[in-house]
Image (tube, coloured by chain):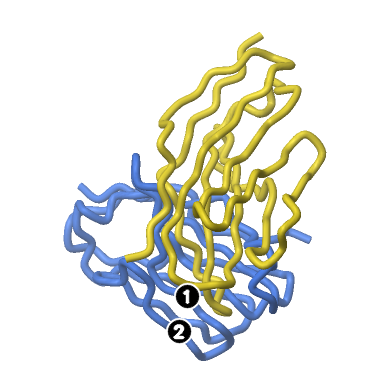
Chain colours: A blue, B yellow
Amino acid sequence: NAGVTQTPKFRVLKTGQSMTLLCAQDMNHEYMYWYRQDPGMGLRLIHYSVGEGTTAKGEVPDGYNVSRLKKQNFLLGLESAAPSQTSVYFCASRGSYAYNEQFFGPGTRLTVL
Amino acid sequence: AQTVTQSQPEMSVQEAETVTLSCTYDTSENNYYLFWYKQPPSRQMILVIRQEAYKQQNATENRFSVNFQKAAKSFSLKISDSQLGDTAMYFCAYSTDSWGKLQFGAGTQVVVTP
């Protein structure tokens, strides 16, 4: 099992450009999450999904959109990138119970110039 | 707002010694779930230990144990017999709902020295 994978691992964008980050999991998990990690702030939740076709906003959703067309994939989109979106992005997935651990992908380092 | 506070930005410990990381949180919920995650230089987030708030007994996983004080809203992590591979950033987190949304602290950098 690959677990949780993220594509790409690194990306540099110019202000105003768009891009999509792909997260894939092979554990048949219902729940998927997108976090961003900034220095000194820990991880903050951007959006999450509780099943195929459903998404919801997290703590810092502005400037991002998500889609979950297939259960195994969770896409994070930036329509018009801003320097404030320079960060490391983590995807995670989890089984059915709140006590279950979240399995994290390796992260994507995004720089917006 | 619900928050998690890790008051120690960095801690250094010698191999084979013990180190304790502090974590306090703020929630009005009665039942919730607490986690410690480790992030080594590889950047991979790895679960270290977890605790359900309604369980009185402190969780233990090999060299890792917690001291959960519900009334004080405190969830400290003790690393015993520290090893070089324990060098990492450690994050305290909790979740109060069935969606599993995690609220993270800012992290404590642990450096284990020979």
Q: Is residue B6 left or right of residue A103?
A: left
What residue is drawn where x is 82% and y is 38%? B62
The earlier-in-sequence mark between 1 and 2 is: 1
Where's residue B64, x and y in %?
Answer: 73, 38
Nearer-the-camera pick, B81 or A47:
B81
Q: Classify mark 1: helix, strand or loop.
A: strand
Q: Quadrant of the N terminus of chain A?
A: bottom right
Where's residue A90, x and y in %?
Answer: 49, 56
| Vertical placement of residue B46 versus A24, above or below | above
Nearer-the-camera pick, A69 or B111:
B111
Q: Chain of mark 1?
A: A
- Rounded to the nearest angstrom, the CA distance separating label 1 from label 2 is 6 Å
Q: Classify mark 2: helix, strand or loop.
A: strand
Q: Are marks 1 and 2 on the same chain?
A: yes
Label drawn at residue A5: none
What residue is drawn where x is 27% and y is 56%? A85
Tag 1: amino acid: Tyr
Res B55 quadrant in image: bottom right
What residue is drawn where x is 40% and y is 44%? B106
Disc 1 to disc 2: CB gap under 8 Å: yes
Where's residue A104, x and y in %?
Answer: 60, 57
Name the residue carrying label 2.
A55
Q: Is residue A109 visible?
A: no
Q: Residues within 10 Å of mark 2 (few under 14, many from 20)?
A: some
Name the residue carrying label 1.
A48
What residue is drawn where x is 51% and y is 82%? A68
Where's residue A66, x and y in %?
Answer: 41, 77
The image shows a total of numbered marks equal to: 2
| Vertical placement of residue B91 versus B25, above or below | above
Q: Residues within 10 Å of mark 1 (few under 14, many from 20)?
A: many
